[in-house]
Amino acid sequence: MLAAIDLRMYPKTDAELPHPCAHLVHAALLDAVRSVDPSLSSEMHDTSQVKPFALSTLWPRTRASGDTLAVPKYTECRLRVCALTRPVFEAVSAALFPRLASNGSIRLASHEFKLLHAALESPYGGAAEYADLLHDRGAGIDLRFTSPATFRRRGLNVPLPDPMLVYGSLWQKWQAFSNVQVPESVFEEMSAALALSRMDGHTRVWKFPRYMMTGFVGIAGYELVGKVSAAARELFGALSSLAFFAGVGYRTTMGMGQCRVAADTAEDDTADSDRDVPQESSCHAV
Amino acid sequence: MLAAIDLRMYPKTDAELPHPCAHLVHAALLDAVRSVDPSLSSEMHDTSQVKPFALSTLWPRTRASGDTLAVPKYTECRLRVCALTRPVFEAVSAALFPRLASNGSIRLASHEFKLLHAALESPYGGAAEYADLLHDRGAGIDLRFTSPATFRRRGLNVPLPDPMLVYGSLWQKWQAFSNVQVPESVFEEMSAALALSRMDGHTRVWKFPRYMMTGFVGIAGYELVGKVSAAARELFGALSSLAFFAGVGYRTTMGMGQCRVAADTAEDDTADSDRDVPQESSCHAV
């Protein structure tokens, strides 16, 4: 099972937070999960394997300046919590939904954020079974990278939407968590035919307390070149759709690599055009 | 020996040309070389090896619309012809310079272009020995890709400024043409430490008569991460400098992959910002 929870909250007092603050979100989420399922919480924290969840950083409607987010009290902020397995979704739900129902809050650094709303609805939330994802979406798909995406290769970061790295990362997650098995040969056929058809973007640096990460934001188009089997086209569609839940690349549990199939709209193409402002495309839609 | 000839010319009548028209430049150059050295001309044409020259397309001061270049008569146009070996430089010189001295012209499609000026001077021309290039330019270097650059990997194009592909392409040219040998181990040390530190750009499609090519234009910063030997830093400087003469990637003899170390100026960073206009940064400087 796959779920993306679109979570809204506001700070009870004026809040100043680092941007990104996904490490604070990460800590708050694991805290919340610990209260309902301590062993799952430590598994989510400790495993060095591919992790069964992804997070966004906090995106208020106000704009950030540099590496700081100044959020006036009562300002609605958005957050995505994505689960790649049913146990994680159930634990996150058990941690969040009762708290929501009781007008509860979560704490990011020293700031209390009142939970407002959590939904599994588009455009930022959703739910699906892995099997649902396996359908042909065509030979060309655009992905929008709304938070910095980077990949590891031979010990170095590669902040580029390279088809091999992007779809390799998604395939790794599919293999780790999907209850629907797809033969490796189908992935090999797909990736041998997969080219980058277009790209428009730039790198952005995210400063975390103990390290900086450079990643790609923008849009990238992928295309299956030549004739491929129906199974390969379906896997291409599935992995592309999986990006919405799993993110791509490195540190997706720290807000990086938020990514989704780009809708064919003008809004989508112009998102993230204001480069000195950290934002996801949602900021434009508000 | 390395040389970049900054060639200026104007059409004697109003000219309409395809954009890019580097295939026409390519044909005209080989024609001109044929008149002085037929065997070198066919070698330049036929060899499937790494080619010992690179060309830009024609860049007039006027702007192009879509895939067409409308050049009013007497409009100065710029062209770069780069030679990676002394024999090629000598043949190109013998083909061009007497023609220049005698007020001669070259023909692109049905249009006669009067040769105005050819110079080995910066910012678009230059000359160097391979040995000159081998010096430490620091651990971080920005490259500006002024015409679409793409690379081949497993039969597919990769239109991204991936450090492995960019510096792999330059290293291939260094090995093919440099009279200064650098051990493979130095390249290996350098490339193992080489990361992409920043990127800002997009893909652009160039339509040639029989095919379309998608490549990357924009800026990419490369950085040696960690401690590397002096020899590796010098090779990093050398290959970065080589880009000015050799171009990078695929079809550099057809105007693609024009590239140079980016100067640390505002002009350089904002070049190519006008996306519907095919241009090199020179168009801004005029």
Image: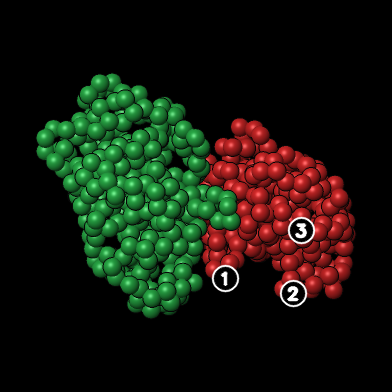
Chain colours: A red, B green
Question: Comparing marks 3 and 2, which lies closer to the viewer?
Answer: 3
Q: Earlier in the sequence, mark 3 or mark 2?
A: 2
Q: Residue at x 33, y 66 (%)?
A: B237
Q: Residues within 10 Å of mark 2 (few under 14, many from 20)?
A: few
Q: Residues within 10 Å of mark 1 (few under 14, many from 20)?
A: few
Quadrant of the image for the N terminus of chain B?
bottom left
Q: Nearer the viewer, residue B165 or B161?
A: B165
Can residue A195 be seen here? The reply is yes
Q: Residue at x 43, y 59 (%)?
A: B169
- As displayed, is residue B10 above or below residue A105? above
Task: From the top left corner, tell me how far across and down residue A221 is, in percent.
Answer: 61, 44
Same subunit: marks 3 and 2: yes
Q: Nearer the viewer, residue A284 or B73?
A: B73
Residue under label 1: A154
Q: Nearer the viewer, residue B34 or B116?
A: B34
Can residue A14 be seen here? The reply is no
Residue under label 2: A46
Q: Residue at x 76, y 49 (%)?
A: A232
Residue under label 3: A185
Q: Earlier in the sequence, mark 3 or mark 1?
A: 1
Task: From the top left corner, tell me how far across and down residue B174 is, in percent.
Answer: 36, 64
Q: Which mark is residue A54?
A: none
- As displayed, is residue B83 above or below residue B102? below
